[in-house]
Image (cartoon, rainbow, N blue to C red):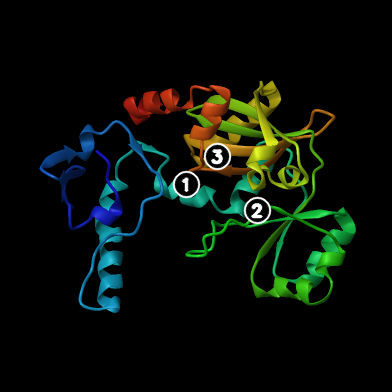
Amino acid sequence: MRFDAADFPARVSVSGLLGESWDVRLDMDGRTVMLTDITGAYYRRPTNFGCQLADDAETQWAQAEARAGAGGLLLTSGSWLNHPHRSGYANYRPVQLEAARKAGLTVPATLITSDPAQARAFAESHGDLVYKPMTHTPPGRGQVVYATPVTRRDLEGPAGQSISGTMHLLQQRIRAAFAVRLTVVDGHMFPAAIHAHSEAAAADWRADYDAVSYEAIAVPSGVAQSVRKLMDSLELRFGALDLLVTEDGRWHFLEVNPNGQWAWIEQEVGLPISATIAEALMRPAAAA
């Protein structure tokens, strides 16, 4: 069953009866599914609940009630890949960067700040930096904010002062031999090297897909062990990790996306990611 929160309540009804545990049923287009019969629930960017009432205030209240009620009942399942709350928690960049360092991964020097003076001092200490957004594309803008190289000079004057408008993540720029997209599913690792052939791709390979090439590689055992510790600490079954590998062979952790893209890397390199996800969804969560 494909269930989007936007289908509620027009196409979907949800009911939960509390006994020894919650007995939850979904009714959609003449089909009934009991939550206890589900072995796998794949969480992938749902839209907002579709409640529409007389005015905006009532609609917002109805959507909040739907999220608390229908959403709360769905969260009682233990079969999520990943559980939405664990994905939400892991998406906080300060949380995942600290967890990665504690797991033994090498993390670039990082500053998250709204203070221009702190940003300039960080650049003085660490040289060239990279600015990275911590959330998705601004709503309705139809644009992507890529990782952007930043120098000490960029942080002077009005441009530097604009940092005070919100929080900014700055990291020491790592001059890498290549990037790695590492997809992890229940401990199974699917690493692919991404080689950049332009300046834009070297800063962020998403900025110039025509100038990158792909290669299946292996993960060093020490890095693999640390990645498993990271996934365990964040309670994630799935993750799309971005790393950089320098000329000396050192792997640097950048981020883990609990809901990241994977189909294109499977197509480019031939890694069996989709089959592994399907197998994970067919196993009871306790066996994962």
Q: Residues within 10 Å of mark 1 (few under 14, many from 20)?
A: many
> Label 1, on which residue?
87
Select label 2 or label 1 by which is in front: 2
Q: Can you say whether 135 is above or below 27 in the image? A: below
- Foreground pick, 269 / 170: 269
Q: Earlier in the sequence, mark 2 or mark 3?
A: 2
Q: Residues within 10 Å of mark 3 (few under 14, many from 20)?
A: some
Q: Can you say whether 191 is above or below 88 in the image? A: above
Residue 278 disc label: none
- Foreground pick, 22 / 140: 140
Residue contact at pointers 3 and 1, CB within 8 angstroms: no
> Label 2, on which residue?
146
Secondary structure at numbered mark 1: helix
Instruction: Give the spatial CA distance, label 3 vs label 1.
Output: 12 Å
Secondary structure at numbered mark 2: loop
Residue 119 on image: x %, y % = 79, 65
Residue 244 on image: x %, y % = 73, 37
> Label 3, on which residue?
233
Q: Does residue 151 appear anywhere in the picture?
A: yes
Secondary structure at numbered mark 3: helix
Q: Decide if residue 140 is on the left or right side of residue 60.
A: right
Q: Residue at x 53, y 50 (%)?
A: 91
Residue 209 location, quadrant: top right
Instruction: Give the spatial CA distance, label 2 vs label 3.
Output: 28 Å
Residue 123 on image: x %, y % = 85, 60
